[in-house]
Image: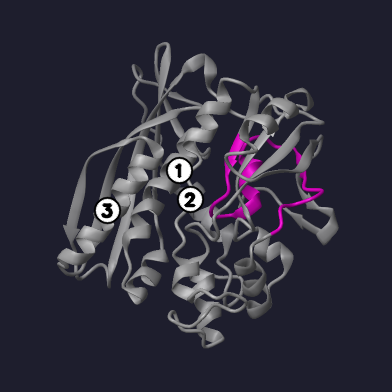
Amino acid sequence: MSETTGKILDRHGIGEFTATLIRQLKYRRNDFKSIGPMGGFTSLIDLGNIALAFNTDGVGTKVMVAKDAGKYESIGIDCVAMNVNDTVTCGAEPIAMLDYLSLNNIDIAVSREIGIGLNVGAQMANISIIGGETAMVPDLVSTLDLSGSVIGIVQKNQIITGERISDGDLIFSLQSSGLHSNGYTTVRKILKENEIGIQDKFPGENKKTADILLEPTRIYVKEILDILNIVDIKGMANITGGGFRNIVRLKDMKYVFDDPAEPQNVFKKLKELGNLSYSQMYETFNMGTGFMVVIDQDSKTDFVSTLKTRVQIKEIGHVENGTGIEIPKLDTSLNGYY
């Protein structure tokens, strides 16, 4: 995989690779039809009055941090979170998950910790883990890889696609818990170049670097499902790989972030230590915003009053006719997704 610098992954190259792969997937059944194109946060199958939502995602190279720290519980939560947070973006309720674990050796203690984390994540998202697969592939992986697939359900007339987003709509941030499970290739390179060990205190923190990096991904499912019955939500974006560019996947509009959420210290220090630009940071990390919700002006009062005591929220921007992403106060512009 190519890189644009020694630290930042080549998102354009990743996008081209993915688009090429998708173009080969031409076969479709005629009885159970998909809803919408590929490339959104979740995939939908039409079952009449309802639709099934499908997602699959993994923890990525965060597992290497877990290995170095000898702590694996949090990555089980991450695996659930990365999937269910995508599923709920279309208004679907996640209901069940399968996990996939590939590893190069048997370690019962590691198995127990990952299982505990998966169970905690399942409780937080209110889903059942109904099965999965464990593969011993020592020739393929140097440590382990953890991923999962989630299924959700939504009434077809309640699917949220982003198509109704229009000029003047508001963008709200739901605060992240930290890095979540993206950008760890970049993070690990920055720490290595600055000779910061996993057991060292993270710069500007009283916590060890391992504890900062292994903070579990926040799960937004319960808050979003509750707000769906109160507020007319026009679009939702899970801010993962690709950072703020993820919102462009909803609809090709101009998204202006007048007052982005204050990033946690971990992002500020990574920017400083890695000598990264704001554009690189906002297209790689969540920068304190783990989830975005787009609503109209009339829904603001109900939205804020319902969520303000449950998760830290902030109005961070608005939608305009046009295309791309602007962060005026940081003199930063981003192109579309990938």
Res 61 seen here: no
**Judging from the image, what secondary structure is the residue with disc 1 in?**
helix
Marking on residue 54: none
**Looking at the image, do the residues carrying marks 3 and 2 touch, with CB atoms under 8 Å apart?**
no
**Looking at the image, do the residues carrying marks 3 and 1 touch, with CB atoms under 8 Å apart?**
no
Q: Position of residue 175 (x, y in %)?
A: 61, 49
Residue at x 23%, y 65% (from the top left corner): 110
First reached walking from the N terminus: tag 3 or tag 1: 1
Marking on residue 18: 2
Find the distance from the CA under tag 1 to the CA under tag 2. 6 Å
Residue at x 61%, y 75% (from the top left corner): 5
Q: Is residue 181 left or right of residue 263?
A: left
Find the distance from the CA under tag 3 to the CA under tag 2. 33 Å
Q: Is residue 79 above or below residue 234?
A: below
- Magenta run includes residue 225: no
**Label 1: which residue?**
22
Magenta span: 236-262
**Label 3: which residue?**
116
> Crowdedness of circle 2 by 10 Å Cα count: few (<14), some, many (20+)?
few
Q: Nearer the viewer, residue 220 or 181?
A: 220
